[in-house]
Amino acid sequence: MHWLSNIFKKMRGGVHRPPRIFFTNTLSGQKELFVSQKPGLVTLYSCGPTVYGSAHIGNLRAYVFSDSLARVLDAAGYHVRRVINITDVGHLAGDGDTGEDKMAIGAAREKSTPQAIADRYTREFVDDLSELNIDIKNIQFPRATDYIREQIALAKTLEEKGFAYHIKNGLAFDTSRFPAYGKLGKIDLITQRAGARVEADPEKRHPADFWLWRSAKPGDLQQWDSPWGRGNPGWHIECSAMSRTLLGQEIDIHTGGEDHIATHHNNEIAQSEAASGRIFVHYWMHNAFLTIGNQKISKSLQNDIYLKDIVAKGFHPLVLRYFYLQAHYRTPLSFSWEALAGAAIALDRLWKLSRDVARESTRKSASSETRNRFLAVLRDDLATPQALSCLWDSLKSEEYAPEEKWGLLEDADAHLGLSLLEPPELDILTVKDTPKEICDLLARREAARASKDFEEADRIRNTILNSGYRVDDGPNGPVLTRTAF
């Protein structure tokens, strides 16, 4: 009961009275005051990756969002018990109830086994989270294949209660028996039945019904015994089974991408609440898409970019975290290399300011009005853009003493996760091992710009570009990145 001792530590000196925090609850569509079920404790479940390949930067936005959420709660005095599931079976291509399991697709692509690719991409995913300064030590990462027994037990409970029916292809959940189906996001069941992601199956009673357990097909690489014969679990039931096993039948917060609302999360609600007769999740929170050229980042669209690609171009991983934080989590965010370069310039400047404040304050902190304002905007539905603005305005202002600025940096470091108290000793604007001739060209271009010879500056810029590098100009100077991996 390590988590319980942590709660007692935070409650020492009296009853835990957390500050007022507001979150937008997808269930109501409204901003609501957050109240945890148990004083001092928050249970937080986040939908994790299907580990048949690398997680791209569109996927990773969801985990910086949930980490920001956990940081705000932790700093407010809560102990946060976190789970991010690892899907290593059951998720079919297209996110629906037909097609090949994504793990089988990955195994065939790499001429390997589902377990081997799950091991590889789980390690890579967790490493990416660590690079983004997400505290992986305090997160559980359960794998779906380790909870087959719990998934079977939950499916059996639903069958016994009359919410599921057994047909040739497996055990299906009967959505008509759950009148509240579609309440998340106010999805009309009639519309859902007609939706493109709902496949017609002549054996199902209703098109929106979904598999709790699928009968094994010839050549299935992953299958187990069950009361309904050999087979494998549906995608949705793993989250319900693992969250109730690890966090309890009722949890405080469930996060995920907005694409999970219509089907995956409504299915989680239906099977969980049908089984328990209780509220499954009290606060549903969803982040918006990361896009490129007005398109969602997706492997299927072949516009996917990975954290390793960003690092290969010379950017520090926390530049991506800063880039995410510049937009509210519920606002779509458009990625471009130019926008990332702007984030690099800003973070580099922020790190330089923090070093200056550390020296001037001798790392002694004092309270101030600006610290209160910073905390207030973050506690108002994680308003990270406003928090960054508050931070910048205060650090550049001459109205605050160095000790007050250092106190603000302490709060900002705890909430934003940008290594502000111990900035990396490197220049994030410089590509590693840049050839001397490129550095010379860059210097000549800056001299041309300073003398307002913009024609010459453009000519040199094109020369740099043809040499495999690109120059982006920001308010604090140029940033150089590689144009090829």
Image (spheres, grey):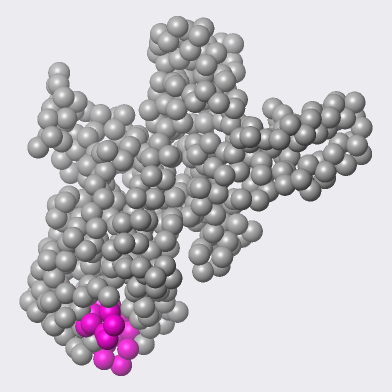
Q: Is residue 205 magenta?
A: yes
Left or right: 393 in relation to 9: right
The vertical placement of 112 against 483, above or below, is below
Residue 229: image quadrant is bottom left
Residue lying at the far bottom in this picture: please name it: 202
Q: Is residue 291 visible?
A: yes
Can residue 389 be found in the magenta stretch? no
| Residue at 26% from the left image edge and 50% from the top image edge | 141
Query: Along the line of sight, which residue is nearer the eye, 469 or 357?
Result: 469
**Nearest the eye: 485 or 310:** 485
Residue 176 shows in the view: no
Q: Which image quadrant for residue 23? A: top left
Q: Is residue 483 above or below residue 181?
A: above
The residue shown at (50%, 39%) is: 317
Task: Please identify the residue farthest to the left as the structure is shown.
Answer: 160
Magenta: main secondary structure equals loop
| Residue drawn 32% across the image and 89% down it | 201
Residue range in magenta is 201-220
Q: Position of residue 12 (x, y in %)?
A: 14, 21
Which corner quadrant holds the N terminus? top left
